[in-house]
Amino acid sequence: MTRMLSEIFGAEEHLLRQGLQRLERASGYNSADVRLTADMLQAAQRKLTELGLDAHDTTGPELYGVLRERLLADDRQLVEALSRMAGSDQVVDAIAYALKVADIERSTFALKQTTAKSLLKKQVPKQTMRHLGYRSVDSMLKHESVAALLAAAWLLESVTWRRLFYDGYKRLKSSDFEAREVAVITPNNERWQKLADILTNARKHTVVALKEYGAIVLLPQPTTVPPAVMTTTLMLALHSMNELRAASTLLKLCQVKANFGAIVQDVVADEQKLSTDLLDQQVPWQIIQRYYARFQDAFRAEVLEPHIQASDLSWHSIEDVLASIEPSMGFWRGTDHLAIVRNGQPVSFNVIDVALATCNQLPYEHRIVHYLQHSLWNELLLKYLKHDSVEQVVLGQLESELATEPALI
């Protein structure tokens, strides 16, 4: 692992180094990490030049401040463009419109509404009922969308309630699911506004993705609107859309497995991962999804069909969607795994990192690099997967895991 990558990954570096060494051996010592580092340095220099900064003398705090100012300027442009397109200056309405018209795939394999309602009746979310002012679960289910209630329950209910509720997922079958488009839900009455103010103060976000239900819930914006809220919320929603699509593909692929319900539970609890002898840690399913989305000619019909098709394995670029709405956002293209290192510490160009830092008005010392690190590790894995020897091992393991006893009908 190059010094630059080691400094970017920081505390996680020792967990990744051995896995990277194994990938190097499997790929015939291709040095993908070295070439990726060189590409990053060149790309970072180009971005610094675009910002009017000196590629050699710019300090970390200087770059951090300029990136936040750029984000704020782009956000103003985005607000104007989206408000005009949506015919509304309300943040939630504009974002819901953007998600509906963006050139992205929206099909999903999701829990049926009737099944979700049944689960909520068996494990009543009492805190949610109380906050929304309902006396009976039947009345609540009659007047509120199931997706909104699932989102509120996930945020409001106790750890014990969530554990008991999600234990019910173990009994789910593929017949409890259906194909439909991702739903974008925007609860917006006075009760939801009060609830959103409580939740955003505690949780610091207004986007809830329900992977099993194929829905994104956009809570009302807090009464005190933070800076760059349009860009931040839209990016988190687009990020969630990718996660929903990846989860949906995996569930479709596993729908005939005997332990389908347990897989649903795992998908909801965490990102589903694939075991492989090449790494000390498991490979996220999202990597497989992104690999086939990027290299469509590598699609393995004998492993993945008939349950999923090549078209299911899509992955949209958040930066491309933003730029299609507001051209000034084009600056952020190619920055998802981009950074510079100053004094052994990374400064992220990743637009989500920058937006979250701007929205929460974080000082340089508390800057965010999480999305950068996640994207960079994924990019490394994708580059190694391109090599036949690595692909055969990882995807052979995928085939092995899928070849299990089918569910009884």
Image (cartoon, rainbow, N blue to C red):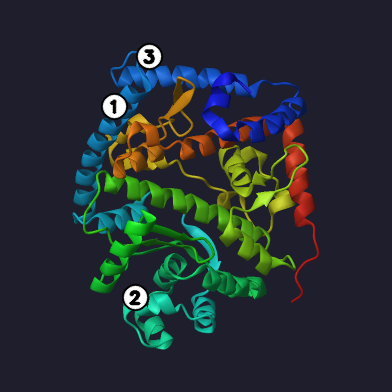
- Residue 132, above or below 23: below
Residue shown at 23% from the left, 35% from the top: 73
Amino acid residing under circle 2:
His
- The CA span between labels 2 and 3 is 52 Å
Q: Position of residue 182 (x, y in %)?
A: 45, 61
Q: SS of the residue at dot 3?
A: loop
Q: Amino acid at mark 3?
A: Ala
Residue ID at (60%, 59%): 267
Residue 199 in picture, x, y percent from top left: 35, 62
Whole-number angstrom distance, CA of label 2 to CA of label 1: 41 Å
Residue 327 seen from this side: yes
Which badge, 2 or 1, comes first in the chain's sequence? 1
Q: How many marks?
A: 3
Q: Inspect the image, locate mark 1, and give the three-letter code of the amino acid beneath it.
A: Val
Mark 2 — residue? 131
- Earlier-in-chain disc, 3 versus 1: 3
**x 38%, y 82%: residue:** 140
Q: Earlier in the sequence, mark 2 or mark 3?
A: 3
Q: Is residue 339 above or below residue 401?
A: above
Residue 373 lies, in percent from the top left, at: 52, 35
Which of discs 2 and 1 lies nearer the camera? The answer is 2
Q: Quadrant of the N terminus?
A: top right
Label 1 sits on residue: 66
The residue pinned by badge 3 equals: 55
Q: Image height check: is 401 above or below 50?
A: below
Instruction: Name the residue rendered at 25%, 42% in the picture.
Output: 78
- CA gap, disc 3 to disc 1? 13 Å
**Circles 2 and 3 in contact, beta carbons < 8 Å:** no
The x and y percentages for residue 206 are 35, 57
**Is 165 placed left or right of 234 in the picture?**
right
| Disc 2, SS | helix
